[in-house]
Amino acid sequence: MKNENQNKQEGDKKSFDFSKIYPLFFTIIFVVLLFQYSFSTLEAIFFDLRVRTDFGINYKDNVVLITMDEESDQFLGEN
């Protein structure tokens, strides 16, 4: 029993919890990417990615054309 507990404690010491390092790792990668590229380039990349992967947009063929002649403009006025 004593030997099993000792082996378990040694195993705990050898294993390392990577879940605490993941946020730091991804933050460092994010900062490096920000400084490596200009913001306009990054914005274009992420905008293109968002547009390509956005499945929620419904494209409709309905078009409304509103015209106004001078007589209607004078009747409505600016106020």
Image: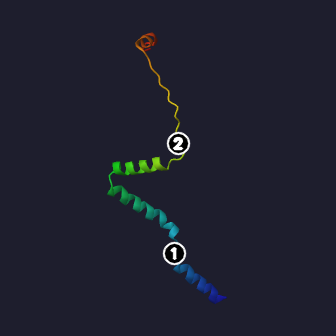
Mark 1 neighbour class, 10 Å CA radius: few under 14, some 14 to 19, many 20 or more: few
Q: Amino acid at mark 2?
A: Ile
Q: Is residue 75 above or below residue 8?
A: above
Front residue of 58 and 31: 58
Q: Is residue 67 above or below residue 20?
A: above
What residue is pinned by disc 2? 57
Front residue of 12 and 42: 42
Q: Secondary structure at mark 1?
A: loop
Nearer-N-terminus badge (1/2): 1
Looking at this rendering, what residue extends furthest in the right direction? 1
Q: Position of residue 15 (x, y in %)?
A: 53, 77
| Direction from residue 17 to residue 34 in the image, left or right | left
Q: Position of residue 3 (x, y in %)?
A: 62, 89
Q: Nearer the viewer, mark 1 or mark 2?
A: 2
Q: Position of residue 18 (x, y in %)?
A: 50, 70
- Identify the residue at horizontal 42%, vertical 48% (top origin): 48
Q: Position of residue 61 (x, y in %)?
A: 52, 34
| Direction from residue 8 to residue 30 in the image, left or right | left
Q: Amino acid at mark 1?
A: Phe
Q: Are marks 1 and 2 in contact (CB under 8 Å)?
A: no
Looking at this rendering, what residue extends furthest in the front direction? 61
Marking on residue 16: 1
On-image quarter of the N terminus: bottom right
On-image quarter of the C terminus: top left
Front residue of 39 and 25: 39
- Identify the residue at horizontal 52%, vertical 42% (top origin): 57
Front residue of 41 and 57: 57
| Direction from residue 5 to residue 71 in the image, left or right | left
